[in-house]
Amino acid sequence: MDAGWDPVRAIRGHRSQPLVWSVAFSPDGHTLATGSADSTVRLWDVALPRPTAAIDKICQAVNRDLTPQERAAYLPGQSVGPVCPSS
């Protein structure tokens, strides 16, 4: 890998070296296609969760409502009230 490049995420599934020679996103951005020297093409679901699903996961992980600062940082333009359901 070139100096200055840091991987964001490793995807594993091809068996040849180098693992992946080409990548392409679908027009809707939900699927990533990768091609490898082992003559395989793999499709990866890379769709992000709906905003409400992501918020639900955050609420479950922290087990509390978000602070006003967290709401401003992570949910810009959203309501200023509670976003996590009360326990």
Image (tube, rainbow, N blue to C red):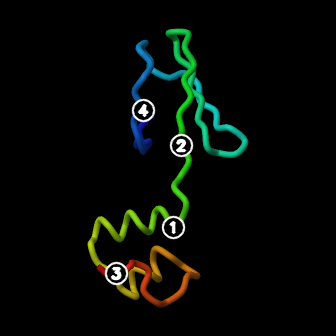
The tag earlier along the polypeptide, 1 or 4, is 4
Q: Circle 4: is it few (<14), some (14-19), or many (20+) Cα within 10 Å? A: few
Residue 22 horizontal/vertical position (percent): 59, 25
Three-letter amino acid code of the residue under disc 3: Asp
Residue located beneath label 4 in the image: 11
* Quadrant of the snapshot with the C terminus: bottom left
Furthest residue to the right?
A: 27
In the displayed structure, would residue 84 be above or below residue 13?
below
Asked whether disc 4 touches disc 2, contact meaning CB atoms under 8 Å apart, the reply is: no
Q: Nearer the viewer, residue 49 or 85?
A: 85
Residue in the picture at 47% in, 83% down: 72
Q: Which mark is residue 67?
A: none
Three-letter amino acid code of the residue under disc 2: Val
Residue located beneath label 2 in the image: 46
Q: Distance of mark 3 from mark 2, alpha carbons?
A: 28 Å
Tell me: 68 left or right of 39.
left
